[in-house]
Image (cartoon, rainbow, N blue to C red):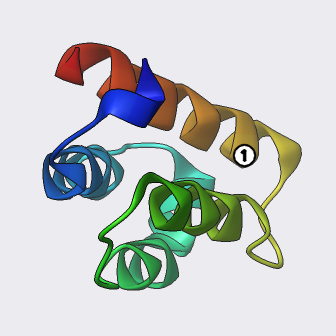
Amino acid sequence: MITKLKDHKQIVHLVRTKINNSNTDQIKMFKQELTGILFKEIKTTTQLLETFDKLMLLEGLEIDAKEYLRYLIYDALIDRK
């Protein structure tokens, strides 16, 4: 369950790594902006979810890229369990 997460840094690091290793053109174009958002200090689950929301709201990202980001976030959360 997401509310029981203890180390948010691991999840953020995993998502950041997946973004850096992505071969998707849209993600490559916005890689700096996306990873920049993820370097913010995150201490609570609420801050983690707000940060992921900021990734989705990044101006210029197409729907396919947003769906891919959702997949990366979901995958990072599932890997963590």
As drawn, 28 above or below 2: below
Q: Is residue 65 visible?
A: yes
Q: The N terminus lies in which quarter of the figure?
A: top left
x and y percentages locating residue 62 in the rendered image: 83, 54
Q: Between residues 29 and 44, which one lies in front from this camera angle?
A: 44
Amino acid type at mark 1: Lys
For label 1, the residue is 66
- The residue at 37%/73% (across/down) is 38
Q: The C terminus lies in which quarter of the figure?
A: top left
- The residue at 47%/36% (across/down) is 73
- The residue at 33%/30% (across/down) is 4
Extreme-front residue of the structure:
4
Q: Quadrant of residue 72?
A: top left
x and y percentages locating residue 35 in the rendered image: 36, 74
Q: Quadrant of residue 26?
A: bottom right
As drawn, 66 above or below 4: below
Q: Between residues 46 and 31, which one lies in front from this camera angle?
A: 46
* Left or right: 45 as drawn, with respect to 53: left
Dot 1 falls on a residue whose secondary structure is: helix
